Image (cartoon, rainbow, N blue to C red):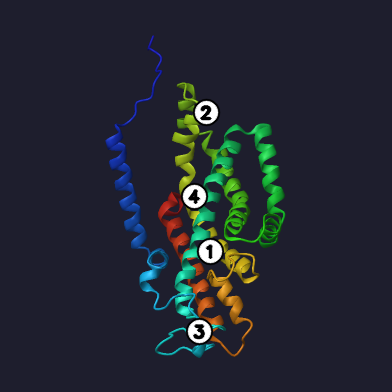
Amino acid sequence: MQPLISAQIEAPPRLVAQNTASLFAKRLGQLLRHRVGCPGLLIISALCLIALFAPLIAPHNPDEAYFDAILSPPNAQFWFGTDDIGRDVLSRLIFGARVSLGIVLGAISLAFVIGSTIGVVSGYYGGWVDNVIMRIMDGLLAFPLLVLALGIIAVLGPNLVNALIAIAIINIPGCARLVRGQVLTVRQLDFVQAARSMGATDARIMASHVWPSVVGNVIVYMSLRSSSALITESSLAFLGLGAEPPTPTWGQILATGMQYWDAWWLSLFPGMTIFCAALAFNFLGDGLRDVLDTRLKS
């Protein structure tokens, strides 16, 4: 009679780290060679660097008003013109990247963590746990996303933190349902059943076996949702429900332009910035999908 196997054979930590680094480098190389994903990654990276080094890049103080150049069109001194109180639009767009991208990336990261956790627990345990969680998610999905975000802001109050929370909440149900659907399939696979028969705890199985099997699809989904999150953040700022003046955001600058139809630069430049950033997030999502989804490769 063969002895019962009671422990898993695991790779040494150094080998695991080397394999992880090698896989990351391989995937990054594939993404950089992707005809759509590469431009998306470069644009998002450039915007993040601009936001990070905004004080060094911006030609003017974003809050400084030049009263002798109010609503000045683009010129040698103010490349993107000035707004209704003489502030440099380019500088405000550069500093606005800090706020707009910060809210988007923060909200998507929060939704990623919470939604993934909910989805894994719901799909793994099933039964009444799955029914309760999914009915709550269905209730949230019943609302149009922007309307739900407006309702959350109305309850919590308009400010940056609450805008981040609202955008995160509206992205949690979709993430949770995606993960739950993947987990329902993965939990029936042989390696999960083997881990369970060897005495692994539910927490260990979910963290070490189930979650790594679904994380690729979740990353792709959340990268695609980032463009929608950016549009939602800009919409909230446009309606005055985001950052409070004089803190610059892209949507807030666009809202100023709507009050002055002759000052075309106040609408064009922030609108194009939002458009390019949203398009870059979509490009990055398409690239990640092709790189991480093994079904497309086969």
CA–CA distance between discs 1 and 3? 27 Å
CA–CA distance between discs 1 and 2? 35 Å
Judging by the rendered image, the residue that carries numbered circle 2 is 202
239 lies above or below 176 = below
CA–CA distance between discs 3 and 2? 59 Å
CA–CA distance between discs 3 and 4? 43 Å
Q: Nearer the viewer, mark 4 or mark 2?
A: 2
Type of residue at label 4?
Asn
Type of residue at label 1?
Ser
First in sequence, mark 1 or 3: give its number: 3
Viewer can see residue 298: no
Quadrant in the picture for the N terminus = top left
Say which mark, if any, is on residue 217. Answer: 4
220 lies above or below 101 = above
Judging by the rendered image, the residue that carries numbered circle 1 is 227
Say which mark, if any, is on residue 82. Answer: 3
First in sequence, mark 1 or 2: give its number: 2
Residue situated furthest top in the rendering: 1
Q: Nearer the viewer, residue 235 or 53?
A: 53
Q: Nearer the viewer, mark 3 or mark 2?
A: 3
Labelled pair 1, 4 in contact (Cβ < 8 Å): no
